Amino acid sequence: MKKCFIYARTGSQLQSLMGAGIATQIGKMKNLAKKIGRTVISVFSDVASANAKNRPGFEEMMVRIEKGEADCILCTDLVRLTRNSLTTTRLMSLVEKGLKIITPTQSFQNDADSLFTMTLQTGMAERYSRSISALIKRGIWTKKHPRYLCYRRRST
């Protein structure tokens, strides 16, 4: 079929300001689609955590994939799609039925290595997300913490 969807997600507007915004992700994925000979039929995006239950762009994309409108998702990284086991299971079920997930550095398809790697990466992302959440709840990691803003403070 060679028809694909692009999915882009940021966890916050702050990420957009830091160069990892939705428009940047979409541009990179359109270039990748041209490079690998895929036709982009729709672009979906959300500004929400990958753990959020309410991601309208993601949900619409999944429904359309389940209807057979595309056989591929292009995204900048697997964690743009999922950081929890329920969504991972849903995606893996579709991969086992022929869906391909393509990032600039990896491709996930219905083979043992892809499914294992997908499980491992999303499991690690879920663990990281839960660790940060626990630190925030305990007050150790706040929005004022330099690492929260994705940069390291330089010593002067």
Image: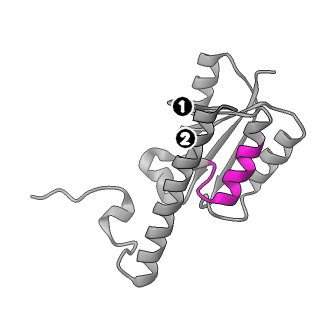
Circle 2 residue: 117
> Left or right: 23 with respect to 43?
left
Mark 1: amino acid: Gln
Q: Looking at the image, is 43 positioned above or below residue 3? A: below
> Left or right: 82 with respect to 96?
left
Which residues make up the magenta segment? 81-93
The image shows residue 69 at horizontal and vertical percentages of: 86, 33
Residue at position x 70%, y 32% in the image: 110
Disc assigned to residue 106: 1
The residue lying furthest to the left in this view is 156
Question: Which residue is more in the foreground, 33 or 120?
Answer: 120
- In this rendering, the label closer to the viewer, 1 or 2: 2
Question: Which residue is more in the foreground, 88 or 50?
Answer: 88
- In what element is the residue under mark 1? loop
Dominant secondary structure, magenta:
helix
Mark 2: amino acid: Thr
The image shows residue 93 at horizontal and vertical percentages of: 76, 45
- Look at the numbered discs 1 and 2 and tell me whether their residues touch, using CB distance below 8 Å: yes
Q: CA distance from mark 1 to mark 2?
A: 10 Å
- In what element is the residue under mark 2? helix
Quadrant of res 6 = top right
